[in-house]
Image: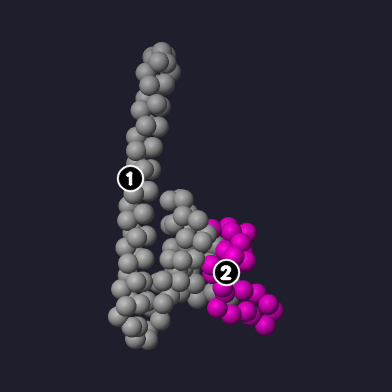
Amino acid sequence: MQIGEVAARTGLSLRTIRHYEETGLVIPSARSQGGFRLYTETDVARLMVIRRMKPLGFTLEEMRELLAAVDRLDSGGPLPAGEREELLGRLRGFEQAAQQRVADLRTQLARAEEFAATLRARLPRDTARS
């Protein structure tokens, strides 16, 4: 599929997808004869991982590290036991970091909601409004 369809499916802008390509996070699987980027379902799935990591504050380098570990685990070939355990350990670390960041965001959201409620409570109730 071309980049426009990928953008529509992922909710990412064309510029963002191109940026992720420039930084090496996602490389189009092919190019058309006209030079258009062509992406596969695997490429779309990779972009979705990146999209989900971004609001949690993961850096591009952290994204690259996670994707490299996932790529290696998904390579299909046998992995030495030590390497497999190391890669799974990295994934566990990212999962724990994601859980902590989600918890931190929930705390921030609760505080923001409390603040909004405080402001709302200070406003006079306008019964004439509908």
Query: Which residue: 61% across, 62% down?
Result: 19
Label ID, residue 103? 1
Quadrant the C terminus occupies: top left
The percent position of residue 17, horizontal first and vertical second, equals 58, 63
The percent position of residue 48, horizontal first and vertical second, equals 45, 63
Q: Residue extending furthest right?
A: 34
Say if residue 10 shows up in the picture.
no
In front: 40, or 115? Answer: 115
Callout 2: SS:
loop
Query: Which residue: 32% across, 70% down?
Result: 88
Does residue 106 belong to the magenta stretch?
no
Label ID, residue 24? 2
Callout 1: SS:
helix
Q: Viewed as shown, does residue 23 lie left or right of 10? A: right
The percent position of residue 31, horizontal first and vertical second, equals 62, 79
The part of the chain drawn in magenta is: 8-37
Q: CA distance from mark 2 to mark 1?
A: 30 Å
Instruction: First in sequence, mark 2 or 1: give its number.
Output: 2
